[in-house]
Structures are given as structure tokens and as C-alpha cells.
Image: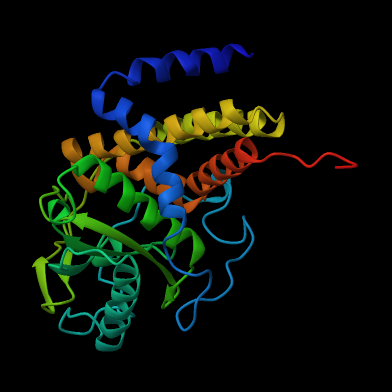
Amino acid sequence: MTKEWTEYLEILSEMKTTDDVQRAYKKQGDEFMKVLSMGGNKNTAPYTRPRPPRGESGLGPMEEAESVVPEIKEDLNRDIWDENNQLNAEISDKLLAIAEDFYFGLDLDAPILDITFTGSMANYNWTEKSDIDLHIVIDYTAIDEDYELIKKYLAYAKTIWNRNHEIMIKGHEVEVYIQDVNEPHYSTGVYSILKDEWLIEPERAEFQVSEEDIKKKIDYFENIIELISKLDKEKKYEEAYGEADRLADKIRMYRQSGLEQGGEYSVENIVFKNLRNSDEIGKLFDIKGKAYDAIMTIQEHAGT
């Protein structure tokens, strides 16, 4: 085992200190199988088109990107927002239909409290690669009292839906997320599609952040993902699955910490968005899924 991998394992071992994380690991196998039976059908009409092979979308290799720091635009994206800064009616109708198709397919008892449009496409830091963040707001406790179980369950349902669909609105992919009504939300732009009004109207504001710090952290995570990929290629599937799972949790907690301390323009959130746009996070989940399948597979022997 390489020196770098040993150091990485030591870092991960320091992270696994909370009871919540430990419980999540233990529950993961059963929950993963339950949720696999849910989510949408792959590339279901009328909203989807075939997903392109890896590498044909996103920013591509980081050296090809002009900058890892988001630019503050002079205006909102006018393909999405009308002259009164209201959401385009046709887009609003389509997003409502997508949200309802996804959520009602889960057959949950909790009512939808709101459906919101948030993230950089509801702000001045949008790019050509920005996703449309479509949030379905519910009360998790209306489903079950075990908050952590429901949170994990819905996270898997969301992941399966988003990975099986590529729904494009004006060239921007729609990412669906089920948000707990009590969950803190750190975006400076939130639009209620149900109410057709801004809950938090964005303001154009400059910010300063170290591009060097962002690139160093992106390189760090990319290197770790490459090490996990090597484990997968070496058919060390249990190691690959475990480390992919832990790294995904680490990236999630890393981003959450940045949002809590510095908001959407924090280094941590910008790093996360670059990893997502370059499909490094997608690569990580692909490795995890492939490793899981390999672990659970029993090979057929010749002559049996």
C-alpha cells in the first residue's frame, strides 16, 4: 500500500468519531438495497434524453478551465428569468411537473410544503455549467421519527433519480433534492415555484477567495479519487467501496462546514461545485456502485 494511501486512511479514521456517522455506515447496506427499487425509470419521457458518456459534459480536466472561482454576472440568466425577475412560466410548469413526478413516485405520506428553485441559477454567480437546483420541501418527521434513516433514504432516492436522468432546461441540468423544512439553507437566492415569488431575492455582491487554495483542495480530492479508482481496477472491491463511501461523506461534511461558516461563496462550496462540474463526484459514485455490485456478485463456474 502506498504512503499516500496510508496517510489518507489515517485522515479518514480521525473523521469517524460521531455516533451519527457510525450508525449511517452500519445502515448503509440495507438502505441501499431498499432504495434501489425506487427512483425513476431510466431516461423516461418526456423530460430526458440519453446521458452522454463520461467526459462529454462538465468542465473536463481542471487545467482546461479558465478559472475555478465563479464570476459574478451583471444580471440573472435571462433564459430563465423574465424582465420582472420572475421565473419563466413555461419553465415553472415544467419544474413543477418534474418535482411531482419524482416525489409522488416515492409514495410517501408527507405533504409537499413548497417547491423551490435555488443555487447559482437563482443568483448572479451562474455559469453555463450550473445546475438548476430543484428542492422539494417536506417535513421529514411526517414520514418517520427516525430522522437519520429518512435523511439517508431520501438522499439515495435523490441520487438514483439524478444519476438515471439528465433533464435539461435551457441547457442546464435539473438536480432534484428533497429538503427538510427544518434544515438550514444557506443560499442567497431562493424562489418559491409554488408561490411564484422570491423567498430570498439575490443581490449582486463581490467576494474574494484564494484561487490557489481552491485548486490545491481540488487536486487533493482528485488524487484521492484516483487512488480509490486504482483499488477498483485492482479488484479490491471491499476496500474501494468502503473508501469511496467514506470519501463521499467527507466531501459532504466538508461542503456543509463551508456553507455554515462562509456561505455559498466559501472555499469549501466552490471546491465541491468544481468537483461536481468536472464529474469527479460522479466518478466516485460510479466506483462505489461498481464495487458494491462486484462484492454482491457470485461468479458462475464453468461446467455448473
User: In front here: 179 or 304?
Assistant: 304
Residue at the far right: name it.
Answer: 303
Is residue 186 among what the camera can see? yes
Residue at image location 52% in from the left, 41% down from the top: 284
Name the one closer to the observer, 12 or 58: 12
Q: Is residue 214 visible?
A: no
Callout count = 0
> Which residue is at the far bottom?
90
Give the residue drawn at x 16%, y 61%. 138
Position of the N terminus, as image quadrant, is top right
Q: Is residue 230 left or right of residue 118?
A: right
Q: Quadrant of residue 85?
A: bottom left
Q: Is residue 178 left or right of residue 130?
A: left
Decide if residue 294 is on the left or right side of residue 100: right
Give the image's coloring scheme: rainbow
- Residue 204 sits in which quadrant? bottom left
Q: Of 15 and 220, which appears nearest the observer?
A: 15
Left or right for 258, reference 55: left
Residue drawn at x 57%, y 50% as measured from the top left = 64
Give residue 16's quadrant in the image.
top left
Q: Residue furthest front?
A: 304
Where is residue 280 shown, x and y percent of the image?
Answer: 52, 44
Up-down relation of residue 26 to residue 59 (above or below): above
What x and y, as percent, mark residue 160? 45, 57
